[in-house]
Image (cartoon, rainbow, N blue to C red):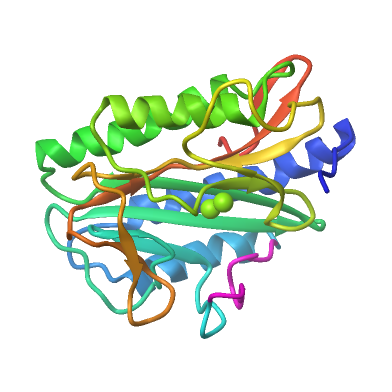
Amino acid sequence: MVQLKTDTSIEAMRKAGRVVAQLLTAAREAAAVGVSLRELDEVAHEVLREASAGSPFLNYRPHFAPTPFPGVICASVNDAIVHGIPNDLRLRDGDLVSIDAGATLDGWCGDSAISFIVGRPRPADTRLVETAFEALEAGIAAAVVGNRIGDIAHAIGTVCRTAGYGIPDGFGGHGIGRSMHEDPGVPNEGRPGRGMPLRHGMVLAIEPMLIGSGRDEYHPDRDGWTLRTNDGSRAAHAEHTVAITNDGPRILTAL
Ligand code: MG
Ligand code: MG
């Protein structure tokens, strides 16, 4: 069931969202050749502590997970698409890193992700990351009253496919509020004009995931969490929490 948020609740979610933006900014600034994913997680955790915010990621255990999630960020490097565990892996020159994180403040959640390259980028990776953000922008632009969920999905999918990238199906965006994952699901590919109508007060996490080779296949790593591309090609992920309002989409996880 979709839970519409009042304007007061959206303001509260904006506060949680701003903490997520601060966390991602700090993690990105700390990311450098030789830095471990665990160290990035520690930087992120400190931002949450300073804001007196909780993490909806830490100890999260969905049905598919073999263990509670051990960090406050997902750190997915190169062929890892999403759900990477922040472990002792140290970043190398040219790595493509996606960091996904959330915050809980006064009982409200925010959820956002960025992708970037550490050190000297490969041109193909730069294009992949830029396209992930373009797809996110297109999805947000379609998140308007009068449209439907399928319009967001179609906008994202069109940007990804036109650029020649793959889209892992079965994973995508979601409603968000007092829980990190609420109805409705927001697929990254779909038919325009289909699905649930968008209404003032809906809050959605919109999150394109792109596979560089153009293929869609992926598999879970042995750790049970990380999703990796089957062909070893690199992937990118971008996400914002967005409120649908009568005045247009409002990004809640901006700085
Ligand atoms: Mg996320
Ligand atoms: Mg999400």
Q: Is residue 166 left or right of residue 1?
A: left
Residue 93 in the image, given as x and y percentages of width and height? 12, 56
159 or 134, nearer to the observer: 159
Give the magenta part as a residue range. 53-64
Q: Quadrant of residue 142?
A: top right
Q: Residue furthest bottom?
A: 67
250 or 153, nearer to the observer: 153
Q: How many marks?
A: 0
Majority secondary structure of magenta residues: loop
Look at 73% across and 32% down and name the residue there: 196
Q: Is residue 143 left or right of residue 160?
A: right
Look at 58% across and 67% down and name the residue there: 57
141 or 11, nearer to the observer: 141
Q: Is residue 211 left or right of residue 158?
A: left
131 or 57, nearer to the observer: 131
Residue 244 included in the magenta stretch of the image: no
Look at 49% across and 54% down and name the residue there: 170
Asked if 94 appears above or below 165 in the picture, the reply is below
Check the picture and name the quadrant holding the C terminus. top right
Look at 74% across and 14% down and name the residue there: 247
Asked if 238 appears above or below 226 in the picture, the reply is above
Asked if 140 appears above or below 235 in the picture, the reply is above
Residue 31 in the image, given as x and y percentages of width and height? 30, 57
Asked if 151 appears above or below 12 in the picture, the reply is above
Residue 62 included in the magenta stretch of the image: yes
Residue 128 in the image, given as x and y percentages of width and height? 24, 37
Residue 133 in the image, given as x and y percentages of width and height? 39, 32
Q: Is residue 34 left or right of residue 247?
A: left
